[in-house]
Amino acid sequence: MCGIVGYTGKLQAQPFLLQGLAALEYRGYDSAGIEVLSPDGSLHGVKCQGRVATLTQRCQTANLVGTSGIAHTRWATHGAPSDRNAHPHVDCSGRIAIVHNGIIENFRELRAQLIASGHEFKSETDSEVIAHLIEDSWNGPAKGDLLEAVRIAVSRCEGSWALAVLCADAPGQVVCARRRSPLVIATTPDGCYAASDITALAGKAKSVIQLDDGQLAVLNPQGTCSVFDEDGNLVAEPTTMTIDWDASAATLGGYPDFMAKEIAEQPEAIRRLLKDRLGKHGIELDELTMTDEELASIDKVYVVACGTSYHVGLITRDFIENWAKVPVVVEQASELNYKQSVLVTDHTLCVIITQSGETADTLTAARRLRGLGCKVFAITNVLGSTAARESDGTLYIKAGPEVCVCSTKAYTAQMVGAAFLALRLALAKGKMTQAEIEKKYHQLEEVPGLIEKVLGRSWQDKEASRVFRRAHSSLFLGRGVNSTTAAEGALKLKEISYLHAEAYAAGEMKHGPIALLEPGFPVVAIVPQDHVHDKTISNIQECIARGATVVGVATDGDEDVAPLCSNVLWIPPVPDEFLVPLVAVVHLQMLARYVALDRGYDVDKPRNLAKSVTVE
Ligand code: F6R
């Protein structure tokens, strides 16, 4: 949450800063701001509530000239979204400006101390204390050394930060610092670029420096960057990472929005992930970094994740329990973190699932489980993310940058990653034979083609979206693995169309939610040809008896479903019922998108949300 960028070099700073903010806007879009060091030696900036597009318009008249600067796009935590609370924040002298992603947990105490010593605050944010702390150390012990001033300032802070600092009295320098919030730096002949993540640096460099926790960096206009530890010692070999995707991966490429693009990319993402996985261990999963003996000894799996990734966690449980016969506990990370007791065995594997690899709740949960002695295996999309760096093993799902705030292609690719883990465990534990695993792998290979068929039926979702036109609420029903598909469909719908949607296990509906039903109430029922098909049909009947309008997700040729539904979203037959969620969800992603578009909403940037949730 919140995106920061910085630049110092030969070029004008403003174009990159605005373009970088646009690329990072999925991290928050409550307000945006920019600060540039002008040739006259003073800082000039523009900031405003709203989107980067509004800031960009304002910048056209502001004429910000200068070759070093910082900028920010905000997801509000402390202080309402407003011009006043927009970053950058400046110190009392107006000569030091900062942008911050994270939370300064002790800001109240620091703010009181700073006010008592004469500082004047202009915003309600936690971040502003940093500017004043730097001012204090700049004028005090740091004696005009910006790196030292920042180092001393952050040593007084508790919480998390990715920070970029610009100072009118240290021309040309941008100083960065990181603790728990990501920050990457590209050094190029044109100068140095800093950003919250590599999406903003696409096309600038083939590899980037990744600051580690506690590190600081001085960016110079000559394109050099020095990294320091929290004690101020030079780090001889900072961590670097190669950018393995090209800039076009983060552009629309002819699609109307990123959601449409990312939904369409699912078959390719899964094909990429499946490539070269079959081998003597059934599924080759070297990323697990565990021997057969270690895998065979696993007697419990703890899966932690949030949101859509949590739904992948629920499917992971189905895969592992059914294929590897190992008991699985799935927890929402934010719940696990504050549970009084977390029960693990000596051989519990912790699996974290996180598209961004930066979700604060998930990282905290993983640290807790690691502290209890568990090995941590991460399934993530982002190379070099904190989740990857802090885990014993990491499977990259290689879905490419997911720019739309709501997750689509990462959901299906993460499910495939979870299937790899379950099958690898199944072989190591002797619960499936090599031949059975090969069969499952070949079934997985069919999935991209099946998704392509569903993508070709998007007109069915468009037509079904009309059912939701006058709705105030809706119910999503499914059984077994598809109770999770229902949960994911409901989450997609509510997050981008702002229409309330509740997901329920179909058989459980009669114990309460059935009271919601009235004539015209929309119910989405996932009812593929599986072993609970007839039971779900009965639940659909119960909805119809109360006047509900049912949209079914059903298997081609199912003559029981069509007469019951106002619309059917047809899926082709799927070779294994455990794999249906990978195919059926694609209809629900498209349905949610059409409902949101019908209501006139921006599907890529739903209100109040941010893609990378780096606060607890
Ligand atoms: C929903 C969505 C969120 C994320 C959640 C976890 O469409 O995108 O619910 O799934 O914030 O994010 P990651 O997977 O990055 O940990």
Image (cartoon, rainbow, N blue to C red):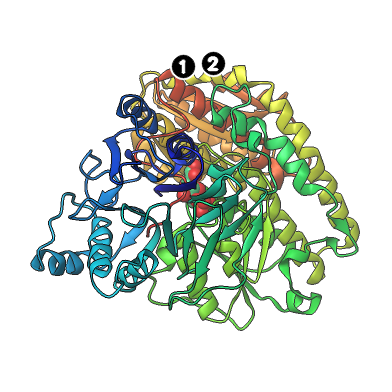
In this image, 312 relative to 611: left or right? right
Of 266 and 58, which appears nearest the observer? 58
Q: Is mark 2 within 8 Å of ligand 1?
A: no
Q: Which mark is residue 6?
A: none
The CA distance from mark 2 to mark 1 is: 6 Å
In this image, 257 relative to 31: left or right? right
- Above or below for 454 versus 483: above
> Which residue is found at the position 39% from the left and 71% from the top?
339
Q: Position of residue 494 (x, y in %)?
A: 41, 35
Q: Position of residue 495 (x, y in %)?
A: 42, 37
Quadrant including the C terminus:
bottom left
Instruction: Estimate how packed mark 1 is, as few (under 14), some (14 to 19) or many (20 or more) residues with alpha carbons within 10 Å.
Output: some
Q: Give the residue type at disc 1.
A: Arg
Tell whether label 1 touches label 2 (CB within 8 Å): yes
Of 277 and 161, which appears nearest the observer? 161
Of 54 and 517, which appears nearest the observer? 54
Q: Quadrant of residue 265?
A: top right
Q: Quadrant of residue 225?
A: bottom right
Q: Give the residue type at disc 2.
A: Glu
- Above or below for 535 versus 139: above
Seen as rendered, the residue at the extreme front is 40
Tag 2 secondary structure: helix
The residue singled out by tag 1 in the image is 466
Q: Quadrant of residue 36?
A: top left
The residue singled out by tag 2 in the image is 463
